[in-house]
Amino acid sequence: MDSLSNPSDTFRSGFVALIGRPNVGKSTLVNQLVGEKVAITSPVAQTTRNRLRAILTTPKAQMVLVDTPGIHKPHHLLGERLVQSARAAIGEVDLVLLLLEGCEPPGRGDAFIVQLLRQQQLPVLVALNKWDRVSETQHDQAEEAYRQLLADSSWPLMRCSATSGEGCNGLIEALVEQLPQGPQLYPPEMICDQPERVLLAELIREQVLLHTREEVPHSVAVSIDRVEEMPVSNKRSARQGRTAVLATVLVERKSQKGILIGKGGSMLKTIGQGARLQMQTLIDGPVYLELFVKVVPDWRCKPARLAELGYEGK
C-alpha cells in the first residue's frame, strides 16, 4: 500500500479551487482554513498572481486548496494570463468553492463568474465571505440577493468570515462531504506545495503591497536571484547559521523605483525588514536579505519577461 494512503474506505481527498472576484478574500480564507500563513494578503485587489496550493489534512480528509487570481477584466498581458490561470483551475479540480462578498450586493462580475461555473460539470459550494460585516437586521436581505443570483442552481450556500474564522469549521465540513473518496495525496504535515523561492518572492511582494502608493503595487514583480546558507564563522559557536536571500524587485518606471527606495533608502529598508521577519518564520531561522530595484519598462506586456517570472500562458 502507498505510504500516503489511508486504510479507511471513507477517507476523502481532492482539489478545491477558490474562485471569485479580486479582493473577495480568497487568500485570507486559505490561511484561515489551513491555520497558517501560506498565501500573501493585502487590501490591494489582484494580490494573488500564482495558483498557490495549500494543503489541509484532517482525520477524515485531505483537501488541496487552489488559491487562484481574481477573475477580472484584464488591461494587459499579465492580467490576461492571471485570468487564464484562474479559469484553467476550474477544469483541473474536483470541487469549486465560489467566494462572494456577502457584505456587498452582487455585481456584474459575480454574475459573470456564476455563468462561467454553470458551464462546468463540477460540484460548486458557495460561501458568502465577510459575513461579520453584515448587520443582523440585513442578514435575510443580503442572503436573498445572492440566492436570486444563484437561482436555478442547487449549489449549497454557506456564510463565513475569513478574518474572524466564523463559519469556517462548518465550511470545512461541507467541503469534505463533497470530495470524492481517495487516499492522502501529500504527507499530513505538509501545508503548501510551492517551491521555497516562490514563497520568498511573494513575501517581499506582500510588503511592497502593504507599504507603497497606489501606482506601484500592480507594476511590481520580484525575482529571487540567490538563496545561500551562510555557516557560522566560529565553529564553536552555538548560534545557527543564516540564510542569505538576494532578490530583485522589478518596476516599470523610474518614478516607481524612486518610491520603492524612498528617501535615503528608507522605504526599501522598511520593505526588507518586514519581509525578513516573515521569511524567518517560513525558514525557521535567521535571514540576511538584500534587495535591489530594477526598472524594466512595460514588463507586464512582454511575453518573454512574464515567462521568466513564472507567469506562463496557457
Image: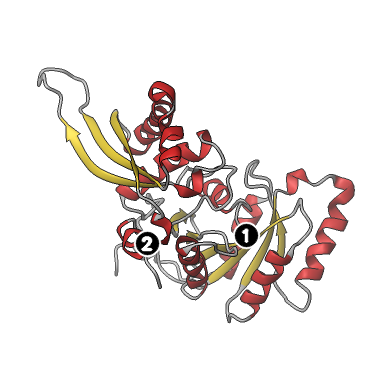
Question: In the rendered image, which quarter is residue 303 located in?
Answer: bottom left
In the picture, the disc for residue 302 is 2
The residue lying at 43 percent from left, 42 percent from top is: 205
Label 2 packing within 10 angstroms: few (<14), some (14-19), many (20+) = few
Whichever of labels 1 and 2 marks the residue nearer the N terminus, that label is 1
Left or right? Give the position of 94 relative to 221: right
Residue 250 at least partly seen: yes
Question: In the rendered image, which quarter is residue 204 located in?
Answer: top left
Left or right? Give the position of 309 relative to 174: left
Quadrant holding the C terminus:
bottom left
Left or right? Give the position of 3 relative to 138: left
Type of amino acid under label 1? Arg
Residue 62 at least partly seen: no
Element at label 2: loop
276 in relation to 54, above or below: above
Position of residue 187 measured from the top left corner of the image (x, y, whole percent):
35, 56
In the picture, the disc for residue 21 is 1
Position of residue 261 measured from the top left corner of the image (x, y, whole percent):
40, 31
The residue lying at 61 percent from left, 51 percent from top is: 23
In the displayed image of the protein, which residue is found farthest to the right? 137
Type of amino acid under label 2? Lys
Q: Looking at this view, is 99 or 198 the one in front?
A: 198
205 in relation to 286, above or below: below
Q: CA distance from mark 1 to mark 2?
A: 25 Å
